[in-house]
Image (cartoon, grey):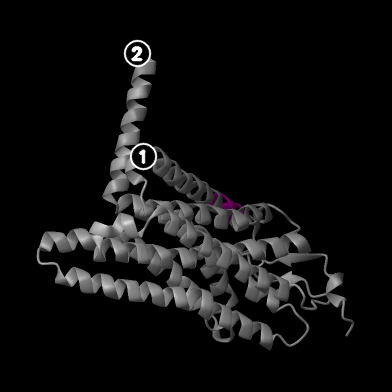
Amino acid sequence: MEPDNQMWVREFILFGLSSDRDIQVSLFVLFLIMYLVTVLGNLLIVLLIILDSRLHSPMYFFLTNLSLVDVSYATSIVPQLLVHFLSDHKAIAFVSCAAQLFFSLALGGIEFVLLAVMAYDRYVAVRDPLRYSVIMHAGLCTKLAVISWVSGSMNSLLHTAITFQLPMCTNKTVDHVSCEILAVVRLACVDTSSNEIIIMISSIVLLMIPFFLVLLSYIQIISTILKIQSGEGKRKAFHTCTSHLTVVALCYGMAIFTYIQPRSSPSVLQEKLISLFYAVLTPMLNPMIYSLRNKEVKGAWQKLLGRFSRLTSKLASG
């Protein structure tokens, strides 16, 4: 085998979800609507946090980061998916495929670490509320956010470099909706056992360690809540964590199911659906979860809508 056989592959062909034209048009409309809702919802959350001084706290600083990660993750996959729904030649250039894999892996890793950081933030808020602002000061919050972005990006850079050094020969058909790492690794015409081991190790480091930190934080949170005497105090303390806990269940649940056991993973169709759930549905649901279950966010929405209503009334009367 020639060492540079992989250079024969200048582009990849993505199978996508369906070859039926009518189904593809319907999927285009569905995913376009979901993508627009995702972008609008997450950017509105960011705008709301910036405009409302009551939301200038560590919790909402991390929520801003989470919203930016979600909209970026969806953008790394969905626009290409939409183009392919309406295209006959569903190709993606080698460099574009590598870039898509890098950004999707990086943003996914960043989200895992961010969720662990947010769990620690909730732990401090429940465990030591009087010293919360002192412990979660601006410097610490910035450092934790930087650690999240850097760790996810470095992990993705390692995987992308290793994956695209594999000799692909002339095999260029990716049976997936995007350049997902396991789907690309399967194209290699060499033994990929070492790559699968690296994926497993990376999953443990960047997925399971944050996951166990989340579990540890919530064990401490529940232990603290149980010690609270009043029922109202318990409900209030638990309510501050429900939105984050819901998002954690969605994100970690799907990721663990997909990546921890690559050899015994679900069928290709199931992999596609799981990938789409994580790339499209979860980023769309996150702002809704935080809006519907968080009194402070709902209050900020009402305040913003009230301002908008008064402004439109003045313009109409003037």
Task: Name the amino acid, label 2.
Answer: Ser
Q: Residue furthest left?
A: 230
Find residue 250 and report its horizontal and vertical position in percent. Answer: 41, 67
Q: Mark 2 points at which residue?
A: 317
Circle 2: is it few (<14), some (14-19), or many (20+) Cα within 10 Å? few
The image quadrant where one finds the C terminus is: top left
Q: Which residue is drawn at 87% across and 80% down?
A: 3
Q: Is residue 129 shown left or right of residue 136? A: left
Q: Which of 81 and 74 is in front in this view?
A: 74
Horizontally, is 2 left or right of 104 in the view? right
Quarter placement of the N terminus: bottom right
Q: Please give the label number shown on residue 261.
A: none
What's the amino acid at mark 1?
Answer: Asp
Mark 2 lies on a secondary structure that is: helix
Is any atom of residue 285 visible in this view?
Answer: no
Residue occupying the point 61% across, 58% down: 77
- Give the extent of the magenta segment: 24-30
Percent of width and height locating residue 286: 41, 56
Which residue occupies 87% across, 76% down? 4
Q: Choose mark 2 or mark 1, whichever is in front.
A: 1
Badge 1 marks a residue whose secondary structure is loop
Magenta span: predominant SS is helix
Q: Nearer the viewer, residue 114 or 168?
A: 114
x and y percentages locating residue 233 in the rendered image: 15, 60
In screen coordinates, is 103 left or right of 139?
right
- The residue beneath circle 1 is 52
Q: Residue at x 46, y 60 (%)?
A: 282
Circles 2 and 1: CB distance less than 8 Å? no
Rendered position, 245 above or below 168: above
User: Is 174 within the magenta?
Assistant: no
